[in-house]
Image (cartoon, rainbow, N blue to C red):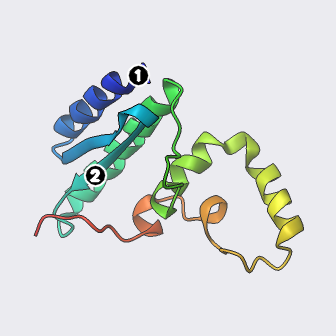
Amino acid sequence: FSKMAATADKIHEVAERHGLIMTAYGHCGAGCMHTKILMDTDKDFQWESARAAIAEIYDFVHSVGGTTSAEHGIGLSKAPAFKKEKAASLELMRAIKSVFDPNNILNPGKLMDAPDDWVKATNLRYQLL
């Protein structure tokens, strides 16, 4: 909870520096903060700016003891940051999953095995038209 104001400030600073429109909102009482990027998906430079901004924000969040996860779970768009955050535990997680899902039929390609680029992992739902 003590780092939420600094995190919101960081999100807005990173967004401004990268030329993005980004919101920071959440459930302060639960310690959850979310972001949304509004962008023109037809402009390649905005994709690159978004990638750089998101990487910087997750690095900051992890450096102050925050996590990729929130009350809605990880999701495909956060899977790359989750994999980076939990890198030391991924092989153990895969081993446990293989015991309960030896044929890999439960959510194949999700979370631990999602693409490393969040842009390729999911379709964005929010954009400027």
In the image, 56: left or right of 113? left
Say which residue appears at 47% left-offset and 59% top-offset. 117
Give the quarter of the image for residue 106. Answer: bottom right
Secondary-structure class at tag 2: strand
Quarter of the picture containing the C terminus is bottom left
Q: Is residue 99 left or right of residue 120?
A: right
Q: Position of residue 45 (x, y in %)?
A: 21, 56
Identify whether 96 is placed above or below 64. Answer: below
Could you say whether the residue bearing mark 1 is in a helix, strand or loop?
Answer: loop
Is 108 in front, or is 47? 108
Would you call the spot at circle 1 few (<14 residues within 10 Å), some (14-19), or many (20 or more)? few
**Residue 107 position (above or below residue 80):** below
Q: How many marks?
A: 2
Q: Is residue 25 left or right of residue 61?
A: left
Residue positioned most to the left: 129
Mark 1 and mark 2: Cα distance apart in space: 19 Å
The residue at which mark 1 appears reads as 3
Residue 4, position in %: x, y? Answer: 37, 27
Label 1 sits on what residue type?
Answer: Lys
